[in-house]
Amino acid sequence: MGRTLPSITQAFLQEQQSLARFRRALRREDQLALDDLLADARQHLAEAAYASHLLPFEIMLLAMLVEEHKLVLRLRQQIEVLQVNLERMQRGESPSLKREP
Amino acid sequence: MSSFFGWLFDVYVSADSMTVWFIDEQGHAHALRDAFRPAFYVRGPRQDLHNVCTRLHHQRGVTLKRTERTDLFLGKPVEVLEVRTPPGSLMTIFRQTTRCFPDLTYYDGDISIPQRYVLAQGAFPLAYCEVEHHDGHIQHIQSLDSPWAIDYRIPPLRLMTLRLTGEMRDPARGHRGDLLVSIDKHQFCFPRARSRELVRGVQHLLHRYDPDVIISTYGDNYILPRLIDLGRHFGIPLTLNRDSRRTVQRKRASSYFSYGKVVFRNEQHLLFGRWHLDRQNAFLANDYGLDGILEIARLTGLPAQTTARVSTGTGISAMQVATALRRGVLVPWQKRHPEDLKSGIDLINADKGGMVYNPIPGLHEHVAGLDFSSMYPSIMVHFNISPETVVTRGEQGEPVPELGTRVLRDRVGLVPETLAPLLEKRFRYKALIRKLPPEDPRVERYRRRHSAHKWLLVTCFGYLGYKNARFGRIEAHEAVTAYGREVLLQAKELLEARGFRVLHMYVDGLWIHKPGAVQTPDYDALLDEIRTHTGLEIGLEGVYRWVAFLPSRTEPRVAAANRYFGAFEDGTVKVRGIEARRRDTPAYIKQTQLDMLDILAEGHDITGFRAALPRAINYARQRLVALRRGDVPLNELVVTHRLSRKPDEFTVRTNAARVAAALTREGVTLSPGEKLRFILVPGPEKARPWELIDTKTPYDREAYSELLLRAVESLLMPVNVDRATIDTWLLGNSGYWGPPGVLPPPGVDIRAPLLASCGPALWIRRRTAVEERTLYPQPLGAPLLSAA
Amino acid sequence: MLSHPVDHPLPPPAPLPGGASLDAVLQPRLSLFWGAHTPTRALLTLATALAARGCRPHIYDGGNRFDGYFIARLARRISARPHSILERIQLSRAFTCFQLAERIENTTGSNEPLIILDLLNTFYDESVPLREVEYLLDKTLAHLHQLAVSGPVIIGAREPRQPVQERWPLLERLQLGADAAWMLHPPEASEGAQLSLF
């Protein structure tokens, strides 16, 4: 963009870079989980830029939490559907996509 | 004394006066003289000004006067020395003075003299005027026209075109052809082998038809200099100028390093009493043609030959200068005003650009595209942002959102004053284009002028816009972006309160969705509310039947801010960031992608998109087959690339490096910033310059197939079709889910084998590059349940 | 200048990059740090350290390099109040050599440190003739000397890059004009190296 401060993307990449040693030492499956978190943080770079927080990393942590929470909500929804269907099947009824029995 | 009615056509300095050309109603050209004595101004300590006077007062034609004028940044009148000179000597005397007295402050020193003259007469290029004259001298010019007129007449211009035969290739790089001259529906061909006849023929045509405008292709860098050389060689006087006392003005090509970038300015040949416009050298002329060039000349006060060739920033800068001159405000010579001191915190708050979301990736349906019309210029006008109205200290003025600065409202800023009538005119053209029936001949004209305005406005704001623009000021730039973010967020809040969801935001536009809101009228109330609340004009670009936001190329899990494509309600397609929009893509690939999009656009929603896929794939297959057979004409396979450095500075042998080297071997000098055109060829050569190609040259079928397959992949990413599947469909003959193009239901992996009996809820999707988050939840890692 | 209240007790100053010592640089004099690349990180670190001690350094940025996030990260490590550190740093950016010259000319002497980032960047711009730029630099240097009488003036500059070789004399003028000059080697590898200041 040509502005003075590094762009929020650059700031993010710098934070990512500073985590390089931590990531390297992680087991492979843990690395993948960390990569997911970092990708989550990247969804909200524009909002982080607007916040003009002195330490963008703190906002990135929040963004990761937001995405994690959304995932939890989705999973909860999925589980509820499965529970309902389990009960229906036990009663001999056909499955449904709704959450109510 | 006599008078006539006509259009102001050309103005230039001739020694101690101005030569002014008019074209009358009958199409005759008149050349007249007029006296004009422009001035520059100097400010500084009395003693220094006294020394300046001592040095200048004996110079021929110079008059000195002590006076008061307003400095824009100081905001008040200051004492200055006025140095008035004959028009032909102003630049020289100005340069000498600045060299001898470099510490003083100068104003009005480097403004185009023709622009100043025309402004002083209350006229502008191509203004319709009544001219009173006597004995070849102008007595009075009365403009009967306005640059803000919606409809205006242009003079009856006689056009002559010059180009070489054959493909449009750069003759300076080796292409050879005969000279084709067209005028008044006649066409003449002059074989290059007979150069004497060629020059004589051109001269004869110039004399006989006396064209007003010469439109050439490669005239600036080849045809005109060659003609001039030939004329000299054979001793045939060539009257390219109407003014026989002048020689053709030649400006060399130059490449220089400025503000971290290489700037390349092409060679120019300018005429007197007549215009020379070069299609290849005309900035964006393809978009708006001669109509646009005339409109910009009228608005900016710059002569048409200049407006056809200017680079970004000059147009609006000229308009700002005109406003300043009209106001009697001094125009600063060098940009000196530094940024006011701010704390590190203030900088972190202020140094942001426009809001640019990462969109929600994938395919969406019934999405509305909203955008603020000319957002930044509108903000400048509406909130009165100008270099002299933004203040960093004190309590006066309106506070700017997020920042600590304020904007004075007690006076109209220079920049808003310049932009307001332009925005108004643009707005009216847009309304007329919408209202009139498409066959109306005015529509095309308005559209071109509207397009020309867009170019002007785009360059009025931008990083370079404040860096070296006379009237640029970084605090003003920051205020504009702050208002931009604020307005966008206000719009977001309003639409979310009405139940809409924001899929994407990009500086001045939003993509929104609400179940049930599928047609244009559903958005009227929202738009009105945003208009009222923000004070800015916002419009509905259209409602998309479907729109796809693509992943970023570097990080596929994140969607790119400006790579998307979609189909509107009316079936038209909008594309950003993919191959069809990129300048380096060969025409064949571009066309394939656009045609595929047209097919996909027939789908009215996501289901329709998926249903149209087989046809689109089929079409792609036909295009690929033709490509691999060698049937595609070479001119559709040209790759374009802009040189970023000198040919000898390449360290890696990229295609551009090879092509640059090949041209250099042929004796062509290439400068950074120039465009290269080439074809990918088989074998170790890999790429050959377009100018060295002949019809028998084979092209590299594999390389172009790869480009085409990538272009297809861009379109199919939103439905999780990867290259492996595309290759199977296009190069093989089938797919797991039936004929090529047939997709499995959403949520099912396209590479899993066909099993009709299982429902979608039990299938676990493998993680792929783009997730369709809207419809189905995403499992993480190992499956929650294994298949029954 | 170092008598303001401090946030943190600080270890004795270690050498700056290039072997300069903090004490040497913080005298009222004109110090130059130059190299193939301009030593922005080092100077920003210096500014942060000074602000942490309570100073109010002024930074004139001639190369559009003020990395506020870098300072914030550093400030966070050495102080519980990074916000006040950033507030103490006063900044002005210049995008043309005329702006930078004007900014410097309008500066009055003070005992607060003045740091200039990438001084020569705007002077390397080829759209301004060499002669004009040389004159402007001489004038600017003269004023910087005047300012150095009251407080430390610390300048960062880089060599001209390939396309603008004719501008080497500008760097030479700067080297001759400084009271002390240190040449720096290619950019620091990581932020860890900066902490040697503390």
Image (cartoon, rainbow, N blue to C red):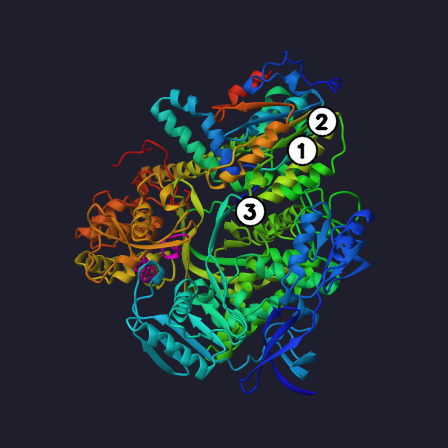
Where is residue C56? Give x, y as percent: 71, 27
Label 3 marks a residue whose chain is B
Kindly identify the residue that appears in the image at 58 percent across and 59 percent down: B314
| Vertical relation: B163 (above or below) B689 | below
- Quadrant into which the N terminus of chain B falls: bottom right
Q: Nearer the viewer, mark 3 or mark 1?
A: 1
Magenta region's main secondary structure? helix
**Cα distance between the residues tagged 2 and 3:** 42 Å
The mark found on residue B1 in the picture is none
Q: Is residue B567 left or right of residue A1?
A: left
Q: Secondary structure at mark 2?
A: helix
Residue designated by label 1: C141
Q: Say if the magenta span includes residue B586.
A: yes
| Vertical relation: B262 (above or below) B428 | above
Residue designated by label 3: B355
Kindly identify the residue that appears in the image at 60 percent across and 38 percent down: A51
Residue designated by label 2: C148
Q: Are the two marked residues, 3 and 1, in contact with CB atoms closer than 8 angstroms?
A: no
Question: Which amino acid is tagged 1?
Answer: Leu
